[in-house]
C-alpha cells in the first residue's frame, strides 16, 4: 500500500510542474505544435540594479590590552605562587587605574611542563613548570592606554607579559547610519546616471539589501622592552574605516 502511494506521489511530482509550465506558454498559430510554442519567463533582474558604497572614518574610543603574568619554577606549587602574587599586583594596578571589574576578563590560564632532552638517558626530562595567567583589560579612556600599560608593567615586574593591543568603537551605530546614507546616495546617483545614458526614466525602488556594517577591530603587536622603563609608553589608535555596501533595484518607467 505504501509503495503504491509513493508511486502516485512521484507521478504527481512530475505532472504538476509540467502543468504549471504549459500554463505559461502560448501558441500563436493555435495548433499547439512544438515549433509554435512561445515561453514567457519573468526575469528577476528587470529594471536597473546598482551597488552603492559608503565609508566613514572614525577615531577609536576603546583600547583592549591582552596582558598577564608568566612564572617558572621547579615545582607547580612554587610557579603558581609566583604567578598568583604577580597577578594580584597587576589586578590592583588595573583597578587603581580606573579599569572596572566588568572590563577585566580572564582569557587563558595554563600550567605547562618545561622539558629538555637528556642525551645520556636518551629521554625527555622535566626541568620545571610554567604558569601563565592572561586577561583582557578594556580601557574606555583611550588616552590612558599608555599609562595603564606602564602601571601594570611596573606592578608585574619581570613576570609581566603584554601580548597585543586592539582598538575599537564602543557604539558604532551613528557611524553605521552615516555610512548607510552615503551608500544609498551612491547607489541612487549611479542608477540615475545609467537611466540618463540609456534614455529611460528611473522608477521606484523594488529591491534593496545591505552588507557590511561591522566596525573593524585593529590589532597591533605590543613588545615589552623593559618592565621598569621610566619613559611613558606612547599609544596611537589612528582611525578605523566603517564600510557599508547596498544593492538597490529600480523600476524603469514606461
Image (tube, rainbow, N blue to C red):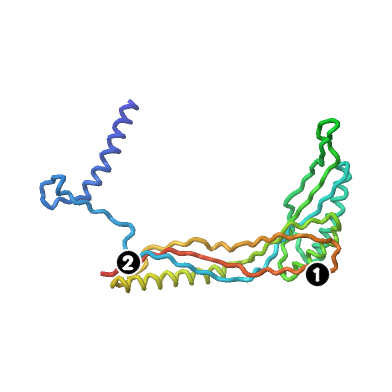
Q: Nearer the viewer, residue 12 or 14?
A: 14
* Image location (x, y in percent) of residue 240: 61, 67
Query: In this image, 227 relative to 240: left or right?
Result: right
Could you say whether the residue bearing mark 2 is in a helix, strand or loop? strand
Residue 90, given in percent of the width and then of the height, sits at 82, 58
The image quadrant that residue 12 belongs to is top left
Rendered-image quadrant of the C terminus: bottom left
Q: Quadrant of residue 58?
A: bottom right
Q: CA distance from mark 2 to mark 1?
A: 61 Å
Q: SS of the residue at dot 1?
A: loop
Visible residue check, residue 105: yes
- As drawn, the label of residue 200 is none
Measured as percent of width and height from the top left, residue 83 is found at 84, 50
Front residue of 161 and 182: 161
In the visual, does 204 lie left or right of 28?
right
The image quadrant where one finds the N terminus is top left
Is any part of residue 103 visible from this angle? no
**Picture coordinates of residue 57 (x, y %)?**
58, 71
User: Is residue 163 shown above or below 4?
Assistant: below
Count of marks placed on residues: 2
- Name the residue rendered at 73%, 60% in the picture: 222
Density class for disc 1 (Cα within 10 Å; few <14, some 14-19, many ≥20) is few
For residue 244, side relative to residue 7 (left or right): right
Sequence-first disc among 2 and 1: 1
- From the viewer's perspective, is the residue at label 2 or at label 1 nearer? 1
Residue occupying image coordinates x 80% and y 62%? 94
Query: Where residue 232 is drawn, which disc sits there?
Result: 1
Check disc 2 and report the residue beneath it. 251
Q: Hey, which residue is sitting farthest front in the picture?
A: 119
**Residue lying at 34% horizontally and 65% vertically, measured from the top left:** 48
Q: Residue at x 81, y 51 (%)?
A: 70
Amino acid at each position: 500500500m505504501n509503495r503504491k502511494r509513493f508511486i502516485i506521489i512521484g507521478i504527481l511530482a512530475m505532472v504538476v510542474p509540467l502543468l504549471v509550465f504549459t500554463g505559461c506558454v502560448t501558441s500563436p498559430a493555435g495548433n499547439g505544435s512544438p515549433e509554435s510554442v512561445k515561453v514567457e519567463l519573468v526575469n528577476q533582474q528587470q529594471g536597473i540594479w546598482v551597488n552603492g558604497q559608503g565609508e566613514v572614518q572614525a577615531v577609536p574610543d576603546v583600547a583592549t590590552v591582552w596582558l598577564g603574568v608568566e612564572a617558572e619554577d621547579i615545582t607547580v606549587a612554587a610557579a603558581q605562587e609566583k604567578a598568583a602574587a604577580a597577578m594580584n599586583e597587576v589586578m590592583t594596578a588595573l583597578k587603581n587605574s580606573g579599569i572596572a571589574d566588568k572590563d577585566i576578563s580572564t582569557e587563558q590560564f595554563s600550567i605547562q611542563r618545561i622539558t629538555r632532552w637528556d642525551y645520556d638517558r636518551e629521554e625527555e626530562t622535566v626541568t620545571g613548570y610554567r604558569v601563565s595567567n592572561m586577561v583582557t583589560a578594556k580601557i574606555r579612556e583611550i588616552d590612558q592606554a599608555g599609562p595603564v600599560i606602564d602601571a601594570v608593567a611596573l606592578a608585574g615586574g619581570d613576570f609581566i607579559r603584554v601580548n597585543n593591543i586592539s582598538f575599537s568603537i564602543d557604539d558604532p551605530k551613528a557611524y553605521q547610519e552615516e555610512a548607510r546614507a552615503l551608500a544609498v546616495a551612491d547607489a541612487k546617483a549611479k542608477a540615475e546616471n545609467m537611466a540618463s545614458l540609456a534614455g529611460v526614466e528611473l522608477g521606484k525602488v523594488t529591491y534593496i539589501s545591505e552588507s557590511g556594517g561591522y566596525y573593524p577591530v585593529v590589532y597591533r603587536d605590543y613588545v615589552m622592552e623593559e618592565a621598569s622603563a621610566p619613559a611613558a609608553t606612547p599609544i596611537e589608535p589612528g582611525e578605523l574605516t566603517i564600510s557599508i555596501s547596498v544593492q538597490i533595484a529600480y523600476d524603469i518607467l514606461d
